[in-house]
């Protein structure tokens, strides 16, 4: 049996209500009165390729803060009321937020060493299904607008695109901070020495209806320290 879209939204909202009831109950415990909570909504690729591996460091610095994180593309009004910080490149329309840039997006052209070393009409590309304008703009800026004539594979997450490139599916334009490890250990090679600036930033967005508390401030201070090495000099 599969839920309809309306049923899935209802299920998420009911789960959130039950979680709130649970939190209200356990907050009465003396052991929980000293704990703080933080609710994040994070883009899937940003989470998978960058944030998750760093969160244990935050937990070591702030063991009294409990983090819950949603990686859903869209949020219901009820879910939105719980979110303290959204992290991503684009926000749903209608969500009132105050935005602060965190990381400037720079795309790098990467491929599997020994498999793809140049971009020509025979090179397969892997592109972002929701950002098909990246390739035309890159080609116009670097290659006079000439487009690859071979086939392409379109995926809807940078994390999936990076995995496809590692598996030898082709070359791709991906955010440099998401593939730093693969470039350093030579799992992938950078085919164009100059990163391509897209004009996007990965922002910290704060819903205007939520008050900013000390847990939010502690997280913002920490994540900015983590992001600093990935910003251009």
Image (tube, helix red, strand yellow):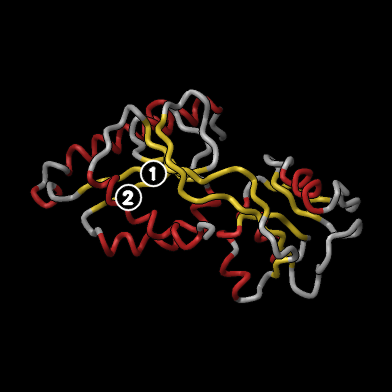
**Camera-nearest residue between 161 and 185:** 185
The residue where tag 2 is placed is: 67
Relative to 181, residue 152 above or below:
above
Would residue 165 be found to the left or right of residue 231 on screen?
right
- Residue 130 picture location, percent across and down: 67, 39
Q: Secondary structure at mark 2?
A: strand
Looking at the image, tell me whether mark 2 or mark 1 is earlier in sequence order. Answer: 1
Image quadrant assignment for residue 206: top left
The residue where tag 1 is placed is: 40
Would residue 159 be found to the left or right of residue 112 on screen?
left
Residue 130: mark in rendering: none
Q: Are marks 2 and 1 in contact (CB under 8 Å)?
A: yes
* Disc 2 from disc 1: Cα separation: 7 Å
Relative to 75, residue 36 above or below:
below
Would residue 21 be found to the left or right of residue 189 on screen?
left
Residue at (35, 47) in percent of width and height: 68
Q: Secondary structure at mark 1?
A: strand
**Camera-nearest residue between 232 and 41:** 232
- Name the residue furthest front: 233
């Amino acid at each position: 049996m599969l839920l309809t879209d309306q049923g899935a939204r209802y299920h998420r909202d009911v789960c959130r209500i039950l979680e709130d009831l649970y939190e209200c109950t356990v907050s009465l415990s003396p052991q929980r009165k000293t704990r703080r909570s933080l609710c994040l909504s994070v883009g899937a690729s940003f989470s998978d390729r960058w944030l998750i591996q760093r969160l244990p460091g935050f937990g070591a610095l702030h063991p009294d803060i409990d983090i819950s994180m949603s990686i859903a593309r869209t949020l219901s009004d009820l879910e939105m009321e719980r979110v303290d910080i959204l992290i991503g490149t684009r926000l749903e329309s209608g969500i009132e937020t105050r935005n602060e840039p965190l990381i400037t997006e720079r795309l790098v052209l990467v491929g599997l060493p020994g498999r793809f070393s140049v971009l020509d009409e025979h090179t397969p590309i892997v592109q972002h299904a929701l950002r098909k304008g990246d390739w035309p703009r890159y080609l116009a800026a670097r290659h006079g607008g000439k487009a690859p004539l071979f086939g392409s594979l379109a995926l809807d997450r940078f994390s999936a695109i990076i995995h496809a490139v590692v598996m030898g599916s082709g070359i791709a334009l991906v955010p440099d901070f998401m593939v730093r490890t693969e470039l350093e250990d030579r799992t992938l090679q950078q085919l164009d020495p100059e990163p391509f600036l897209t004009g996007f930033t990965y922002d910290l967005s704060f819903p205007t209806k939520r008050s900013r508390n000390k847990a939010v401030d502690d997280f913002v201070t920490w994540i900015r320290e983590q992001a600093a090495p990935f910003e251009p000099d």
